[in-house]
Image (spheres, rainbow, N blue to C red):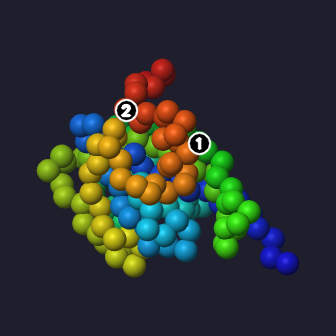
Amino acid sequence: MEKLEPRVAVVVFLVKGKTVLLGRRRSSIGDATFALPGGHLEFGESFEGCAARELKEETGLDIDDRKVEILTVTNNVSLPEDPKPYHYVTVFVRAVLGDPEQVARNLEPSKCDGWDWYEWENLPEPLFRPLEVMVRSGFDPFLKLPLS
């Protein structure tokens, strides 16, 4: 039997005004759900570096490196009925665009149907499960962090 190991993902609350950037996934995990941009942490990479790299790879967007904040970390384990078991430790960061005039492009069409900005109070459905759990818990990526 294959030994399953947790993986680390970094996802980005890219904020503009009161909106966040979301894309509709094309994946064996969470297909057709709306999710934040992000991906797997590479060996030796910082959370902030991973966030900037993944965002650039997926959307072509650059963030302001001086304004990246770690918001929270979650432990996401697949439901027993999921056909493909997974366990992700997910680091959520908040970032803003380096240049607010940039436009998101869909650079990985095999993984995403496209990117758009959504008001936090009016998110599309269905949300990718880790994001949905955060939203239902009352999490707000726009709140000022106590230590920032």
Q: Is residue 59 above or below residue 64?
A: below
Quarter of the picture holding the N terminus: bottom right
- Neighbours of disc 1 within 10 Å: few (<14), some (14-19), many (20+): few
**x, y (%) of residue 145?**
45, 25
Separation of marks 1 and 2 at Cα, in angstroms: 16 Å
Q: Which of marks 1 and 2 is nearer the N terminus?
A: 1
Which residue extends farthest left?
A: 101
Nearer to me, 95 or 21 = 21
Q: Nearer the viewer, mark 1 or mark 2?
A: 2
Q: In this view, does 12 lie above or below 121?
A: below
Is label 2 in a helix, a strand or a loop? loop
Residue located 80% across and 76% down the image: 2
Nearer to me, 98 or 88 = 88
Q: Is residue 115 above or below residue 1?
A: above
Which label belongs to residue 73?
1
Nearer to me, 60 or 45 = 60
Is label 1 in a helix, a strand or a loop? strand
Residue located 45% across and 62% down the image: 33
**Quarter holding residue 22:** bottom left
Quarter of the picture holding the C terminus: top left
**x, y (%) of residue 122?**
32, 43
Whether residue 63 appears in this view of the structure is no
Amino acid type indicated by mark 2: Phe
Residue occupied by mark 2: 142
**x, y (%) of residue 134?**
52, 42
